[in-house]
Amino acid sequence: MSCFFTLLAFALLGDAAVLDWTTSYAKASSALQGLTVEEKVGIVTGIGWQKGPCVGNTPPVPKIGLPSLCLQDGPLGVRFVQGTTAFPAGIHAGATWDKDLVYQRGAAMGEESRALGIHVQLSPVGGALGKIPEGGRIWEGFTNDAYLSGILMQQTIRGLQSSGVQACAKHPVGNEQEKNRETMSSNIDDRTLHELYMWPFADSVLADVASMMCSYNKINGTWACESDKLLNALLKDDLDFRGNAQHSSVQSALTGLDMSMPGTDYNGGSIYWGPSLTELVKNGTVPQTRLDNMVTRILAGWYKLQQDQNYPRVTFNSWTGGTGGPNVQSSHSQIARQVARDGIILLKNDRNTLPLRPSGGSIAVIGSDAITNPDGLNACKDKGCNNGTLTMGWGSGSVELPYLIDPLSGIRNRLSGTTTNVIPSTTDDKNAAAGAAAAASMSIVFVNSNSGEAYITVEGNAGDRINLDPYHDGNGLVVAVAAAAGGKPVIVVIHSVGPMLLESILSHPNVVAVVWAGLPGQESGSSLADVLFGDYSPSGKLPFTIGKSRVDYGDVAVEPSMVDSYEEGLYIDYRHFDKMGITPRYEFGYGLSYTNFTYSALAIQPATAMPAGLYDTIAVITCTITNIGPYAGAEVAQLYLSLPPSAPDSPVQQLRGFDKVKLAPGQAGTATFVVRKKDASYWDVPRQQWVIPPGEHRFVVGSSSRDRKLQGGFVVQ
Ligand SMILES: *[C@@H]1O[C@H](CO)[C@@H](O)[C@H](O)[C@H]1NC(C)=O
Ligand SMILES: *[C@@H]1O[C@H](CO)[C@@H](O)[C@H](O)[C@H]1NC(C)=O
Ligand SMILES: *[C@@H]1O[C@H](CO)[C@@H](O)[C@H](O)[C@H]1NC(C)=O
Ligand SMILES: *[C@@H]1O[C@H](CO)[C@@H](O)[C@H](O)[C@H]1NC(C)=O
């Protein structure tokens, strides 16, 4: 019923498969005793890019039963391996705002990794956080809100690790753009670092994440992987992170980095650690204790997940087509479909156009984004193109699709046996589109916007997007359809990696409905049909803000120079719109349903005494949500907290709780928000600690960051 008990149940479930750190460390320390320096160096160094079956591999140490450890991307499934599930991307899972479902997605991915013998799955992503709307990899994470990201990181980590695979939270911190990512410096002030960018990683440590991978960029001029402040002061001391910090292809980083992966650069040339680390330890430059600490942390993660007992062997090979492994998909397509469906956000629905009730007539299905890539399902390496419907972005965070139900197929399947037929026009040709729209009784137009990792450029987008418009002149395509449709309804469906500008699309009176279908993975068309035809009411909410113009987002652009000073501080996305009093087109947390919900009976139960621990509960807030409409549906109730005036300059409001309540028509349920002490605190820079400011902490409960239904407060003495 409440998120508090749900979380507790997960913790207990997790504990059954996972050892505590003390026991894991004891086993690791004892295994360490018999190892030579060369063996220890082996454990902390990859054997080289493409030298083993996985993207990262260590040499085995048979005398302690340690196999070659297998590390594999990535955040939405298992990269490079055939017969695995292509789940919806992080940003789409974020749009579900569903803690249970995100846990299940993690558990299903973890089951696939474990069955394949993967020890560490490089997932989930909390950085890039997403401060720059065009940032190439913002779709790999869940949202640009630190709180929502933190909770969904926790759920994913618990899910992955409940299946026996080590999670790897990545990438702390400051890799917010692809341009210059390996050379630029993110100079983030201390308060912003704690309250935004480190926040999701702090939650990850609470969820017992086994490892973290630092980002490529510099922080204040020092490589993230060499930053004593990041690795030691922040991660290992402040957060008490006991897993291991790793990185791909960075120069030897001896300030707290524990593993160098893949061990060489991506050409197999320079070797970063290996024999040179052995030399450095033998001649005393790197203390033996530091090497022992690295090895202990890595072995502890392996023991913690009990991977020393009956763990499957790796039989696939990433470099020969990803075949050779077992088929591990099980019934995960159902979870993939549910996440895809529940992450769909209904932005506009005039005259109750949706759901569609097929009763004769015809539907024009328009746009190249409605069909599978004509060149083949996985024709573009690492999804590095934008042909056919968009299911995920490109780069190391992509996977091979095992199959795809594209939107056209999903709609056709759903209409089979009805008297409604489909008129497809599946290029982006405007004349053909206009012809289909004129002939049909209504039109559904598909547009998209794509981005990815910097090593691939797609249609002029070198990782980061060059603008927030649809690709392939999607705006022009919608104009052509709307003009040809006359008074007949036009529905626009959008697949996108992140925020887009919709003013052009919305300016046509014929565009009566807009459906944000995100990055849905392999079950794209079936999940879309579930929602379009009313088998399920849409229940996704925006995990970012859709502004009316690019300038409304403020000065958070892809930085062309070598330094980004993060001058905007805490004020990204809705924190910026709120501070500047800018009305967005669709605010953070927004999303319509086919049914209606009322909010009532706000209650607050403050802690009887101020708790000592930062993550202890200071207040439990509840309210009643009632479904007064005609459809079953789910409402994401959201809690936004404002710090009292005794705090230094702070955001107007910040998300500090959410609960997705599923209700039949006429049914009432309780939304519960458990506010932790940290959620009501700020990072005090001079004192170098979290401080809960005295005074009245006001809060609102609503259906978005601007649709406020109930309000209240609690006083801190
Ligand atoms: C970076 O510099 C800023 C400004 O001096 C400081 O507040 C912050 O703590 C530094 N961060 C790191 C990780 O060194
Ligand atoms: C230790 O070995 C490294 C790597 O071979 C070398 O660069 C360094 O100069 C040596 N230092 C000492 C003090 O011998
Ligand atoms: C696929 O995309 C590339 C650009 O990324 C383009 O050159 C090519 O024509 C596209 N193929 C089809 C069939 O649309
Ligand atoms: C209920 O929801 C529908 C669809 O979103 C909307 O048109 C209608 O105005 C709502 N009714 C009430 C009473 O809020």
Image (tube, rainbow, N blue to C red):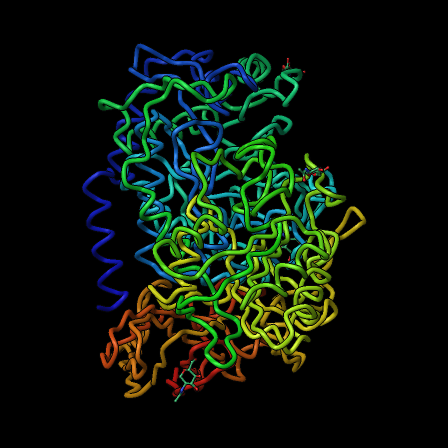
- The residue lying toward the viewer, choosing from 328 and 509, is 509
* Vertical order, 154 against 440 (above or below): above
Residue 279 pos. (x, y %): 57, 13
Query: Dividing the image into four equal quarters, which quarter contains ligand 1?
Result: bottom right
Rendering quarter of residue 393: top right
Q: Decide if residue 485 is on the left or right side of residue 15.
A: right
The tally of labels here is 0
Residue 409 makes an appearance in the image:
yes
Rendering quarter of residue 582: bottom right
Q: Decide if residue 633 is on the left or right side of residue 701.
A: left
Residue 590 pos. (x, y %): 49, 73
Task: State the quadrant of the N terminus.
Answer: bottom left
* Vertical order, 549 against 335 (above or below): below
- The residue lying toward the viewer, choosing from 631 and 661, is 631
Residue at 47% across, 50% down: 520
- The residue lying toward the viewer, choosing from 336 and 19, is 336
Residue 717 makes an appearance in the image:
no
Residue 558 pos. (x, y %): 73, 53
Residue at 60% across, 40% down: 394
Residue 333 pos. (x, y %): 34, 43
Task: State the quadrant of the C terminus.
Answer: bottom left
Q: Identify the residue at the far right of this view.
A: 561
